[in-house]
Amino acid sequence: MIIVIIGSQWGDEGKGKVVDLLADRFDVVARYQGGHNAGHSVYVGDKAFVLRLLPSGIIHKNSVCVLGNGMVIDPKAFFGEVDEMIEKGVSITPDRLKVSSRAHLIMPYHQALDHTSEERLGNEKIGTTLRGIGPAYEDKAGRRGIRVADALSPEVLKNRIERNLAEANKVIAVFGREPLRFDEIFEEMTELAERLRPFVCETSHFFSEAKKDNKKILLEGAQATLLDVDHGTYPFVTSSNPTAGGASVGAGIPPHHITGVLGIVRTYATRVGEGPFPSEMLNEEDGVANLIRERGNEFGSVTKRPRRCGWFDAVATRYAAELNGFDSVALTKIDVLDALDEIKVCIGYEIDGERVDTFPAVSQDLRQIRPIYETLEGWKSDTLGITKVGDLPAKAKEYVDFLSRSIGVEIGLISTGPERDQTIILKDSVMESWFA
Ligand code: GDP
Ligand code: IMO
Ligand code: MG
């Protein structure tokens, strides 16, 4: 069994919590795109973990974790996180952590270029995490990137850094920044590459063998559908493909071996950084936005930036469901809405006076959208920690059913709090079969 987990909105839907829940039943947990721009939070008892680069399964001692070829890996961030995990009592050995030889490396100049690129864009900036993700993927597409396998050969590493740094420093100089020094980068990267060597693996062969042995594999998407470089709100997106198709390419697994796709959907929407957000709460809704931000702890788990808050967008989420082919959905953070008198759901868009029910390609159109809302009554009672669907207030259950109908997919799991046991799994759902 191979299941892909995908964020349906603009990220931070609660992927980490759901991966952690499923990881117990799976043998392998793998990331297939992105890098340490992700922040996946997991709570286990009194311990809090924020996974950035490592798959969330790393917390489970029996999971083997893989960083797939589609990722961009900053080796310093990688070992920073490995050391942090070891300090928290997680055992990390090459037996249970594998890094694709084909993944690309994020170099110090990529991070510098992320800054200059944002500076150049000024008011039109993306609001990136400044981790060097975009510039590393630009080098990959430009066929000058440095892959993990390249870094293991000091000669190749030296040549590539020399060539790429010369170009990067020209741009860096234009922005009046200090040029980066070759010796420092080469020395640091050579050391890190040696430390990485035991973890390096032909990961797609590893997956193929795992499948032959009937192992269960979980593919953990980072970012989300609307941040996908092809399908998201371009250009306000990340530089990889978090969507289901990206899982096949980024893990090196044949598409027809993937058995199921699980969408993570939050009961409302948030966005970090710039870019269109049709159902964003308006100024006069500041009170509600602040309430949600406080109750839902909507501050970036990596950058600590306050997340922009908005209502559930059925048009955008239905688009995600179609595009990824969700077989089941995990609906998170229902408890955050407990305090609201009424809850709005965006059920359509109006652009230039015309009703639109599909997600437009052009960011400009998205900015001019007038969202059409349906307003539902709130349930005004506590759902935190509920584990049985029958214990949900009737109006909360109606809200869940409304969302399920509006996106056309079953909701198989309802998350009622950040902790593992604050979860409802619905009987006879596709989701339930994945937990078997
Ligand atoms: P991810 O990037 O999709 O993994 O999500 P993040 O971890 O960045 O953000 C989700 C936040 O919501 C984290 O702080 C989670 O612990 C928390 N969370 C997840 N599910 C629930 C839930 O059902 N209720 C509440 N209150 N918090 C949740
Ligand atoms: P998880 O996996 C939310 C956003 C950034 C920015 C855009 C591009 O925790 O859901 P990048 O640094 O990737 O070039 O930034 O994407 N972004 C995220 N937003 N959650 C994330 O990850 C994100 N990763 C990137 O804020 O708008
Ligand atoms: Mg996150």
Image (cartoon, helix red, strand yellow):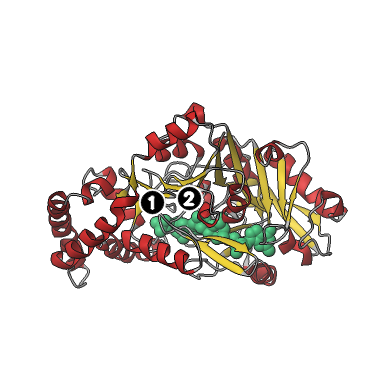
Position of residue 286 in the picture relative to residue 86 (left or right): right
Residue 309 in view in this figure: no
User: Where is mark 1, residue-wise?
Assistant: 94
Residue 325, x across and y down, in percent = 58, 34
Q: Give the answer, above or below, for where 336 lies relative to 11.
A: below
User: Where is mark 2, residue-wise?
Assistant: 227
Q: Is mark 1 within 8 Å of ligand 2?
A: no
Position of residue 11 in the picture relative to residue 204 (left or right): right
Q: Is mark 2 within 8 Å of ligand 2?
A: yes
Q: Which mark is residue 48?
A: none
Which quarter of the figure is the N terminus placed in? top right
Say whether marks 2 and 1 touch (CB < 8 Å).
no
Residue 148, x across and y down, in percent = 28, 49
Mark 2 or mark 1, earlier in chain: 1
Residue 259, x across and y down, in percent = 57, 31
Which callout, 2 or 1, points to the residue nearer the camera?
Answer: 1
